[in-house]
Image (cartoon, helix red, strand yellow):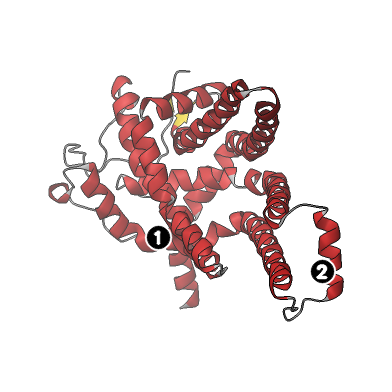
Amino acid sequence: MFEKWTNNYYYGKSGKGDFKKEDLPQTRWQLFWDMLRVRLSGLCRLNLTVCAAWLPLFICIGYYVNHLFNWMNIVEMYNYYLTTGQLAEGFTLESVAALEGMMAGMDSIQFLGQILKECIAGAVLWCIPCILITGPVQAGLAYVTRNWARDEHAFAWSDFKDAVKANWKQSLIISAITSVVPVIVYTSWNFYGELANTQGVMFMVPQMLVVTIAIVWMLSLVFMYPIIVQYEIKTVGLIKNGLMLAIARLPQTVGIRLVTLVPAAIAIVALLMTNSLLALIILAAYYIIIGFCFTRFVYASYTNGVFDKFINSHMEGVEVNRGLSSDLDDDDDDEDEPSSETLSE
């Protein structure tokens, strides 16, 4: 019994049927909700299997957020002492003297600003290896969710593993670039910000330019991992096509990104309003249960349509609108073979 449950967990139920032709959705919006309903449990199973790849990133962010909150509590107790002359529980005169020495003439806001800068600097450096290791996992998720989003078969574990094995080199390059983006943005923002303060506002132009490039890169990641698993293309062409698609569909891509960031935004707002780490714990639980796979599923549903419009419709012999009623696919179509289209650079 346990062996059967384990096999179903990793490989799915082979006898479970898909939609019939007459039941196929008419629009991509319908296709998204139908496939989400059918594949929800599969997304949860796969997410629980692969979420360990993001665990170091969670630990890194959680550590520095907790570090910042500890300092905020210390400064709050210090201000309480200055206002009332009384020591809060756990706060001693030695703590007051040590904190005054560390502040070195700064007020509370300036000191917390310095602590915030140190936390961000430490976080962006430690995020390099944490983000780097997620690239191959993203490629595996992109392959499985691409198939599920267009009503095609994919085993939750074995196809994921095969996609990781086949695409780990390119996906690792993309995640390596992504991992240094926060460092570049943070360093450039501070560097050009200092120049803007001392030599004129003209240096705000390169400051904003770096941020804009970073945003476009993050938007292009919506397309890059699906391109890796769907097309045969060199890395330079992969990056160029990902950036071009992000710019060509800028409003829609921004909207998709914002939708997937809603849980994080709610958690941040709750964190600021309640001053409690419970919001981050709930956010972590969401990502552990389904968050990563659900995000990739949303991206796959979106990119499937974009690829059909901008790429597949211009490639001879490449099928478009898979999963929709207009396909009229034969029942014997091959659903398991990965795509091998060659995408021009």
- Disc 1 and disc 2 in contact, CB within 8 angstroms: no
Badge 1 or badge 2: first in the primary sequence: 1
Q: What's under tag 2, amino acid-wise?
A: Val
Q: Secondary structure at mark 1?
A: helix
Mark carried by residue 282: none
| Residue 209 image position (x, y, % from top left) | 55, 25
Q: Residue furthest top?
A: 345
Q: Residue at x 29, y 53 (%)?
A: 35
Q: What's under tag 1, amino acid-wise?
A: Gly
In the displayed structure, 82 sits above or below 54; it is below
Residue 253 appears in the figure: yes
Quadrant containing the N terminus is bottom left
Q: Secondary structure at mark 2?
A: helix
| Residue 139 image position (x, y, % from top left) | 52, 42
Left or right: where 215 falls relative to 312 = right
Q: What distance separates the C-alpha of mark 1 from that of mark 2?
A: 54 Å
Left or right: where 343 falls relative to 127 = left
Question: Quick one: label 2, few (<14), some, or many (20+) residues within 10 Å?
Answer: some
Kindly identify which residue carries mark 2: 96
Residue 86's quadrant in the figure? bottom right
- In-front residue for pair 201/286: 201
Q: Residue at x 45, y 29 (%)?
A: 231
| Residue 315 image position (x, y, % from top left) | 33, 21
In the displayed structure, 86 sits above or below 243; it is below
Q: Residue furthest bottom?
A: 89
Mark carried by residue 42: 1
| Residue 266 image position (x, y, % from top left) | 44, 59
Q: Residue furthest front?
A: 84
